[in-house]
Image (cartoon, rainbow, N blue to C red):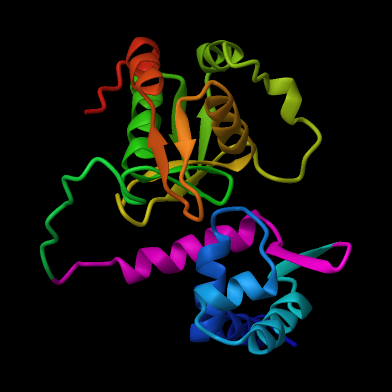
């Protein structure tokens, strides 16, 4: 099968409505059973299992078996980027003016995108890191300056920790709600983990939404000058 045929096949698998809903919900980076995914996709568990089998065969999702349960998740970060990219097309409003939401909550404000931070807050943090000279845009990645690595060392994140992984250290991931990039890749994932450990954000159950804590607001201002109302 040539590249064009593979593209057509993968596109058809991902964009079928039921499977698309499953992949959208798997974008939170967690693993779910077929029964759980059947609920979000509004289909029967049997039908969900059939759809997941097709996604599994195409290596779009992976499965982990624990006892009697099978837990499905996105197979890798590349699939997550593809889903986020489709979301950008869905949110493309070139033909009309969109009024930006003023609410300081919800997934457009602050959320996870697979394993990194996204939404208004994620973009604001990255822009602050760029302003400080810690991150530098270069094609579709970010270069981390020496002063940047020194800053990330505050979170016990070091350049040496990313030497033995095929996944890119950084990546610009176009945010579908902000239309500007946020930080993805190994560094984006590790940075989010550290921010969660510091209790800057609280997870919302059964959602990709993150709530910014008062501690998070204060430390983001102290360390980066980011003002979040």
Residue 19 image point, x, y percent: 57, 80
In the image: residue 67, left or right of residue 94: right
Q: Can you name the residue that lies furthest to the right here?
A: 67
Residue 62, image x, y percentages: 76, 66
Is residue 161 placed above or below 108 in the rendered structure?
A: above
Question: Is residue 98 visible in this depiction of the protein?
Answer: yes
How many numbered callouts?
A: 0
Q: Quadrant of the C terminus?
A: top left
Would you say residue 132 is visible in this rendering? no
Whether residue 94 appears in magenta in the rendering, the answer is: yes
Name the quadrant containing residue 47: bottom right
**Residue plotted at (52% across, 13% down):** 151
Q: Which of the image's four quarters has the N terminus? A: bottom right
Residue nearer the viewer, 4 or 60: 60
Q: Residue at x 36, y 69 (%)?
A: 89
Q: x, y (%) of residue 202?
A: 47, 35
Rendered position, 63 above or below 138: below
Picture residue at 40% right of the left edge, 18% below the top: 215
Q: Nearer the viewer, residue 25 or 78?
A: 25
Vertical arrangement, residue 190 with respect to residue 25, above or below:
above
Q: Quadrant of residue 79?
A: bottom right
Q: Which residues are magenta?
A: 66-95
Is 128 part of what is drawn in magenta?
no
- Asked whether 63 or 141 is in front, the reply is 63
Q: Could you tell me which residue is drawn at 21 percent across and 67 percent down?
A: 93
Q: Where is residue 81? Give x, y as percent.
A: 54, 58
Looking at the image, residue 21 lies above or below residue 229: below
């Amino acid at each position: 099968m040539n590249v064009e045929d593979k593209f057509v096949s993968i596109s058809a698998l991902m964009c079928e409505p039921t499977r698309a809903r499953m992949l959208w919900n798997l974008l939170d980076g967690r693993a779910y059973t077929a029964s759980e995914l059947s609920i979000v996709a509004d289909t029967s568990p049997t039908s969900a299992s059939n759809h997941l089998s097709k996604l599994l065969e195409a290596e779009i999702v992976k499965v982990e078996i624990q006892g009697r349960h099978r837990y499905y998740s996105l197979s890798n970060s590349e699939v997550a980027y593809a889903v986020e990219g489709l979301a950008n097309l869905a949110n493309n409003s070139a033909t009309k003016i969109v009024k930006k939401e003023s609410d300081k909550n919800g997934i457009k404000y602050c959320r996870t995108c697979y394993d990194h931070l996204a939404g208004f807050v994620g973009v604001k943090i990255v822009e602050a890191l760029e302003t400080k000279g810690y991150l530098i845009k270069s094609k579709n990645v970010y270069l981390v300056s020496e002063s940047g690595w020194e800053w990330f060392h505050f979170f016990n994140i070091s350049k040496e920790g990313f030497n033995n992984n095929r996944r890119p250290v950084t990546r610009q991931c176009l945010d579908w709600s902000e239309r500007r990039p946020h930080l993805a890749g190994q560094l984006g994932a590790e940075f989010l983990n550290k921010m969660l450990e510091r209790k800057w954000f609280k997870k919302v159950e059964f959602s990709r939404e993150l709530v910014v804590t008062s501690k998070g607001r204060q430390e983001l201002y102290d360390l980066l000058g980011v003002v979040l109302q």
